[in-house]
Amino acid sequence: MFEGLSDRLDRSFKVLKGQGRITEINIAESIKEIRRALIEADVSYKIAKQFTNEIKEQALGQHVLTAVKPGELMVKIVHDELAKLMGGEQVDINIKGSPAVILIAGLQGSGKTTFSAKLANYLKSKKGKQVLLVAGDVYRPAAIDQLKVLGEQIGAEVYSEEGNLDPVKIAKNAIKYARDKGKQIVIVDTAGRLAVDEVMMKEIAAVKKAINPQETLFVVDAMTGQDAVNTAKAFNDQLGFDGVVLTKLDGDTRGGAALTIRSVVEKPIKFVGIGEKLDALDLFHPSRMADRILGMGDIVTLVEKAQEQFDEEEARKIQKKLAKNQFGFDDFLKQIQQIKKMGNVKDLMGMIPGMSKAVKDVDIDDDAFKGIEAIIHSMTPEERSNPKIINGSRRKRIADGSGTTIQEVNRLIKQFSETSKMMKMMSSGKGKNMMRMMGGRR
């Protein structure tokens, strides 16, 4: 995400020359480049100009430390201003209530129904809540069926009323049902339209008035750029929502909506959709997003994702196996499965500081581990538990069975050996603290 913007900003920092102090003369070209980069990312000219004026004011006259170049100081200033533009602090969703009611609004095609399921999955798996999904889109033929399919995938009940075309009654009945069944959170998916219209706004306003939700979230497709900002403003002016959800942020988006929607509607971005899978939902952290835009990575989010998958008990088991030289390919395969659950491999690599530019033009398939898994599954149980017995004839059989070459099998065995040594080193002495961090907690 934001690759074009990141490249342009990076160039703008490189044109800043001189030592000792940032002046109007040596900052001029850099400011122009930053403004161009923002406009190209679909940020409105007005906001781009306000933003660069603020940067200029912050930067002028600042003394540059001997160990810091002017361009590096400018990166820090731009980072802080980007985070400020996007809201400054992460804002949590309000789930207080018995049950807490969350109303989902947005245009047709913005990803409301999928987001409703993603949010239910998030609240269920991360917060331990009992969630009821409500099929309030009575117009789109497949909307109710889609929500039921998604609900089944995440193990969340879906409330619907066949033949009832009154979304207000459906929502009110659903809340009563949730209260009777002890559900803690109700998520109401509503109908969208192809454009903002009076009938649509009156209907969703009536639903909101009837159910008095703790939280109203506006879902917007980030790929629509500045149009997303305009739509959000129109909704907020008439409906009044509590937060924004940006979907498809992993797609071919220039990022203008993410950068400016907060300053236009004065409502926080609370979630971002970063993929099609039902666990591909992230809390929105302005500072971390600024890190990513400037190619600094996002190590905090990476560690959090690791902590969700690796628990302390599993880390202890691995440590014991490593100490006794019993770490085998079954354990290696288990680690791969946990890494895959963390998300898209290329996105994960981009979170490592300094890696975002390195992997930018590299095509990393989501099935990057497919060949490795095939090789491991072609091994016998004895070979997986004791890799040392895998001789030449065994390697040929494994290669034939997995549809790979002997060279690929050799490469995996070598990588496995090196990884085992590294993990053993990390699990003792200086590496213990890091192992605990990656072990994390559930």
Image (spheres, helix red, strand yellow):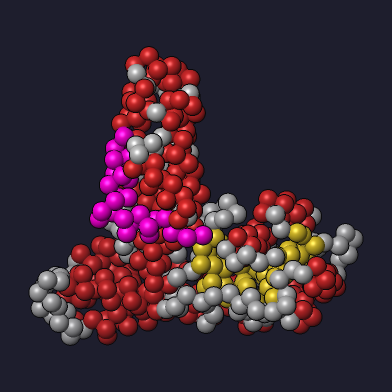
Q: Residue at x 54, y 75 (%)?
A: 92
Q: Position of residue 86 (x, y in %)?
A: 44, 75
Q: Is residue 4 visible?
A: no
Query: Quick check: is 38 in the magenta stretch?
Result: no
Q: In the picture provided, is 426 more to the left or to the right than 268?
A: left
**Residue 59: x %, y % from top left:** 23, 81
Looking at the image, which residue is at 25% across and 66% down? 12
Residue 149 versus residue 199: which sits nearer the camera? 149
Rendered location of residue 207, percent (x, y): 77, 76
Q: Horizontal placement of 222 versus 187: left or right? A: left
Q: Nearer the viewer, residue 426 or 56?
A: 426
Image quadrant occupied by the N terminus: bottom left
* Rendered residue at 79%/80% (across/down): 210
Query: Which secondary structure class fits the magenta region best?
Result: helix
Decide whether residue 424 is among the magenta residues.
yes
404 sits to left or right of 171: left
- Quarter of the image for residue 20 reads bottom left
**Residue 389 locus on image (x, y percent):** 36, 22
Q: Which residues are magenta?
A: 417-442
